[in-house]
Image (cartoon, helix red, strand yellow):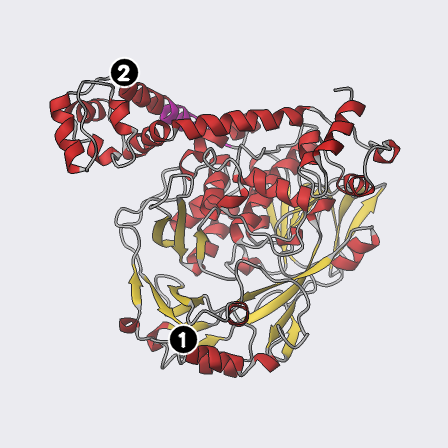
């Protein structure tokens, strides 16, 4: 059935697998996407939304590099919100509510229109390894598929076990069977595995809800979008709603705690700290009298509703009784109950920066198999694995993003350097250079790099060059153009800002925190320049950020340059740390296990202290 040999085979059709297959194929590799069900490619297994705090930055980075997640999100969006607008631009995070069915359809359409990409439906049960290198795969039907590289993106399917109360059964997600056999094969090759847990809330019939008793959450009045391409802005949006649990709801939920797999020992694996189940919230935050419930529609043309904030594995009768005590849910009808799922993962310290495994040449891991949680985290890993599999085939250096270049760089560096023993989720606080890594400048940061790789199109590159040039010209205008005191002072008075006594440059006014671009547009010189040069709102926003936050940006840039100097001090492969008597036993163990590529990565390993780095500097002749 499979003549010849593929360049890249991607196992799994979730967010990681879809991005991996698209990236490898678009770069020119002969690619096969194999998944257990071709009808669920790009499916949203949990909440019907993309983006959010730090996650929105990742989606924009994926788009800037040439991935599909941003485009698919825009085409299937039913609501857009820019979160954290009240804070600085480093915290602004785009998020869309999505039409679940349309999202998967758009992903399938995008992949089917991608050249060099084949599809096949089956389960993988074994991998073919010869001489420490991947050679292919064997399906559940015993069919061999030969490939030069393989990317595993198995999500929650590896020995997946679903829990609802005291009941449990094998499954990768509701209605789909688990993937068995592959974990054992990988362990036999020397890989270390572990177990993690995640959960999902009930889905309910929106016709049975009383929205009048809830708080409406509309989308932005002037909605933006994810993709830097010409995808459309939303002209119509669907509202979400908020309601709350209560002490009565908590008491009803506690009645099922003795039958909860979370508390009776059925589940022993670690769940996501930052997305706890409702029973976990009640147990951990006993002092809280209520918790938010976000009522999220699943699409344009469906009555199905996602009950965000009510993730649970309690018995279905307890779920039903408790949820009917939530305001607005008095007459709720269930589509399906919530459940928890346990699955196998492989600690990511077993990977190189490229997401290639250290044990098997040409074998890559991406997504939840690496211990992450979230569509966006998975998609970004898939994109990077797909690119790096192609680069490896063409004997080119891997594509590795630094911590000061992208949230994706922070994510991968955290995983391979520090590892994770709980589902890893991205936050802005994880990025020490977040002022540089804003959602608004993802294209300026990453599209030129992607264009050099051959993934971003020339049209995208020209658009980025134009955006950069117009922004710099506008910043220069504000820094060189003087203002009229008589025109500016009435504006300053209206904003309770100190008046000026003599003319100065417009940038001095613009840098004030309470003077936004909207106020600046009322100044004649500014409005004339914007109209004459046809400057759009995106360029004006870029100029505002660069002027207002110039000091912070310069400081972070300088700090990044200092830390990146250690990146250039490479540690040879196979370096023997045991011969260094001055290193502690802990340092030797951790360095031998993680095998850092350079001193910068070594310095971020937990347990490695500055004196250990000094020893390595001396040994390496620095």
In the displayed structure, does residue 185 sit left or right of residue 238?
Answer: right
Dot 1: element: loop
Give the x, y percent position of residue 221: 26, 50
Residue ranking furthest to the top = 480
Give the x, y percent position of residue 366: 63, 47
Stretch of the chain drawn in magenta: 456-468
Q: Is residue 47 above or below residue 16?
A: below
Q: Residues within 10 Å of mark 2 (few under 14, many from 20)?
A: few
Give the x, y percent position of residue 511: 30, 29
In the displayed structure, does residue 339 sit left or right of residue 335?
Answer: right
Residue at 32% in and 31% down: 544
Dot 2: element: helix
Residue at 41% in and 73% down: 245
Residue at 71% in and 37% down: 609
Disc 1 from disc 2: Cα separation: 58 Å
Residue 611 seen: yes
Task: Give the number of the disc on residue 480.
Answer: 2
Depth order, front residue of 604/149: 604
Depth order, front residue of 49/523: 523
Residue 176 seen: no
Residue annotated with mark 1: 246
Q: Quadrant of the C terminus?
A: top right
Marks 1 and 2: CB-CB under 8 Å?
no
Depth order, front residue of 256/160: 256
Q: Is residue 218 above or below residue 148?
A: below
- Residue 579 is drawn in which quadrant? top right
């Amino acid at each position: 059935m499979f003549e010849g040999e593929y360049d890249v085979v991607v196992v799994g059709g979730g967010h990681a697998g879809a991005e991996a297959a698209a990236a490898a194929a678009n770069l020119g590799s002969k690619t096969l996407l194999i998944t257990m069900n071709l009808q669920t490619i790009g499916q949203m297994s949990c909440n019907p939304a993309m983006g959010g705090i730090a996650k929105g930055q990742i989606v924009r980075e994926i788009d800037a590099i040439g991935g599909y997640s941003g485009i698919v999100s825009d085409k299937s969006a039913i609501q857009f919100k820019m979160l954290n607008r009240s804070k600085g631009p480093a915290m602004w995070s785009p998020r869309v509510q999505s039409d679940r069915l349309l999202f998967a359809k758009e992903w399938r359409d995008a992949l089917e229109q991608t050249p060099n990409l084949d599809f096949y439906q089956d389960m993988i049960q074994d991998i073919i390894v010869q001489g420490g290198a991947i050679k292919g795969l064997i399906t559940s039907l015993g069919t061999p598929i030969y490939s030069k590289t393989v990317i595993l993106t198995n999500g929650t399917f590896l020995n997946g076990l679903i829990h609802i109360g005291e009941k449990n059964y094998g499954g990768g997600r509701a209605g789909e069977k688990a993937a068995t056999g592959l974990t054992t094969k990988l362990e036999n090759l020397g890989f270390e595995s572990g177990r993690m847990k995640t959960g999902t809330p009930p889905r309910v019939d929106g016709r049975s809800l009383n929205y009048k008793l809830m708080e409406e959450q509309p989308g932005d009045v002037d909605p933006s979008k994810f993709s830097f391409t010409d995808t459309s802005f939303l002209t119509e949006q669907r509202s979400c709603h908020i309601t709350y649990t209560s002490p009565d709801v908590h008491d009803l939920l506690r009645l099922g705690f003795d039958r909860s797999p979370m508390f009776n020992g059925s589940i022993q694996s670690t769940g996501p700290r930052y997305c706890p189940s409702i029973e976990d919230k009640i147990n951990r935050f006993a002092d809280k009298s209520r918790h938010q419930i976000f009522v999220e529609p699943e699409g344009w043309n469906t009555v199905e509703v996602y009950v965000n904030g009510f993730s649970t594995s309690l018995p279905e009768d307890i779920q039903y009784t408790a949820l009917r005590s939530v305001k607005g849910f008095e007459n709720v009808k269930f589509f399906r109950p919530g459940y928890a799922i346990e699955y196998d993962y492989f600690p990511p310290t077993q990977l190189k920066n490229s997401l290639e495994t250290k044990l098997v040449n040409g074998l890559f891991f991406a997504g939840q198999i690496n211990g992450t949680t979230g569509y966006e985290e998975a998609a970004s890993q898939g994109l990077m694995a797909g690119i790096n599999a192609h680069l490896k085939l063409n004997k080119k250096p891997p594509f590795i993003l630094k911590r000061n270049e992208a949230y994706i760089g922070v994510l991968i560096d955290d995983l391979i350097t520090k590892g994770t023993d709980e589902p890893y989720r991205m936050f802005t606080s994880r990025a020490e250079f977040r002022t540089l890594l804003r959602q608004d400048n993802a294209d300026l940061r990453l599209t030129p790099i992607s264009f050099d790789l051959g993934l971003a199109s020339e049209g995208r590159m020209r658009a980025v060059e134009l955006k950069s040039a117009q922004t710099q010209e506008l910043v220069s205008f504000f820094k060189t153009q003087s203002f009229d005191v008589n025109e500016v002072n009435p504006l300053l008075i209206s904003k309770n800002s100190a008046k000026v006594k003599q003319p100065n440059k417009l940038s001095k006014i613009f840098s004030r925190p309470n003077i936004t671009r909207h106020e600046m547009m009322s100044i004649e010189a500014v409005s004339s320049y914007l109209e004459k040069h046809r400057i759009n709102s995106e360029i004006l926003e870029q100029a505002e950020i660069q002027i207002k936050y110039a000091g912070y940006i310069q400081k972070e840039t300088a700090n990044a340059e200092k830390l990146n100097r250690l990146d250039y001090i490479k540690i040879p492969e196979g370096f023997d740390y045991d011969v260094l008597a001055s290193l502690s036993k802990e340092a030797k163990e951790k360095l031998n296990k993680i095998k850092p590529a350079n001193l910068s990565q070594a310095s971020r390993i937990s347990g490695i202290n500055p004196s250990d780095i000094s020893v390595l500097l001396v040994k390496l002749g620095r």
